[in-house]
Amino acid sequence: MRTSLSSVLHGCSSTLLLLLLSACNFATQGPAQPTDVPTATTAIHNAIEVQVRLSAQRIAPGEVIASVILANRSAEDVSDLELTISTDGELVGDPLTSPLDSTPQSAAGGTRWVFPALPARSIAGPFAVRLNTEADPNLEATLAWQGPEAGSASSTASAVEDASLAAVELVASQGQWSGEAGVRVFAPSQGPRRLTVVRLNDSASAPSDPTLAWLGVYEVTKEHAGSVILQVPLLQPAPPYAVLRVAADHGQGYGLTSVYGTVTADGLHAVFSPEGASLFALGINEQRLADGLIELSSDHSETIFSAALEAL
C-alpha cells in the first residue's frame, strides 16, 4: 500500500495542517540540534539523488533505538537496494521495522535490509533496530543500489539522550520552540505557558484498539491554561509525517479525541496539541506503520511537499 502526502492532506483540519507544518519546520527551522546529530547525507549520480538519514535516541538506561529514513528526490525509481546499519553495540532481537516489503538479514556487526525499489519522489522508513548499550555506540547506515545506475550513500549518528525519561519542565513562548533534547514546546498564541511532561516507559496503559499501535504515553501537567504544541519522543519509530490518533485520559479512562498528531521528519518524535492536563497516548494505524512509504506528489500544496523533502 502506498500513501501519498496529497491524500493525507485532503480533508485535513487547520489544526492538523499546523502540526504537519510544525513537523517540517522543526527539522528545517527549529532549535539547533546537538553537534553529534548529523543532517542527511545526499548522493547524486547524474539524475539520481538519494538521501540517507540515520538518527539514534537513548529511550531508557542502556537502551538505544537507531532509525534510518530514506528519500528519493529523483524523477525515477531506484532499484535493487541494500541498506545496512552497522554498530559495535549489542543488537536486540529482530529489527523493529522493515518497510517496503524489505527482507531483514543478519550482517557482520549489524542488520541488512534488501528490497526491490525506492519509488521516485518518495520518503521511506523507518528502518529501525534496538540496541543494549550503556556506552555511546558507533553507528553507520549505508545504502547501495544498482539501478538505473549503481550508487551509494551513508550516514553516521550518535545517540541523543531523551530528556523525558524524567519530568521535563517547559516554558512555551509565542512563536518559537523551546525545551530539552527530545522534548520541546511551541506556543502559537500569547504566552508564556508553563507545563511538565513525563513519558511513561511503556504503552501498557494505552487503550485497547486492534487497529492502532501505541507509540508512547505522556503525562502532561499545565500550570496555565492555553494552547501549546508539544514535540515528544516515541517509544517506537514511525513513518515521517504519518498522522497519529490521540487518546486522552482525564481521570475517567481513555477516549479518542478529535485532536490529531503527526510524526516528525526523523521518525523518532511526534508533535501534537494536548487539550488540558492529562495522560495522552499516541497511536498509529497498524497498516500505516507497516507500510513506511509516502509519495511526494506535486499536484498541490507544493510548499508542504518541499518542506517535507528539505527536512530530510
Image (cartoon, rainbow, N blue to C red):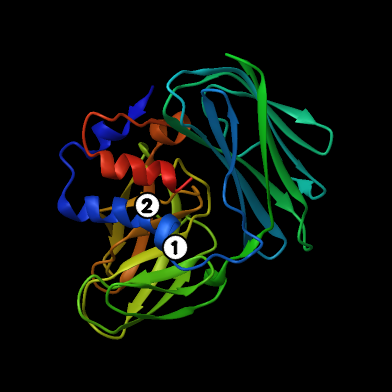
Q: Nearer the viewer, mark 2 or mark 1?
A: 2
Q: Is residue 237 above or below residue 225?
A: above
Query: In the rendering, at what x and y percent does residue 4 appear?
Result: 32, 29
Is residue 259 at all visible to an observer of this figure?
A: no
The mark nearer the N terminus, 2 or 1, is: 2
Secondary element at image label 2 = helix
Residue 43 shown left or right of residue 119 in the figure: right
Between 159 and 151, the one lying in front of the other is: 151
Residue type, label 2: Cys
Within 10 Å of disc 1 (Cα), the crowding (few <14, some 14-19, many 20+) is: many
- Please report the residue visible at 21 percent of the width from the left and 77 percent of the height from the top: 226
The dot on residue 103 is none
Residue under pointer 1: 232
User: Are the residues tagged 2 and 1 within 8 Å (C-beta)?
Assistant: no
Q: Quadrant of the N terminus?
A: top left
Query: In the rendering, at what x and y percent does residue 67 appear?
Result: 60, 45
Is residue 63 at all visible to an observer of this figure?
A: yes
- Please report the residue visible at 36 percent of the width from the left and 66 percent of the height from the top: 230
Residue under pointer 2: 24
Q: Is residue 131 above or below residue 1?
A: below
Q: Is residue 260 above or below residue 152?
A: below
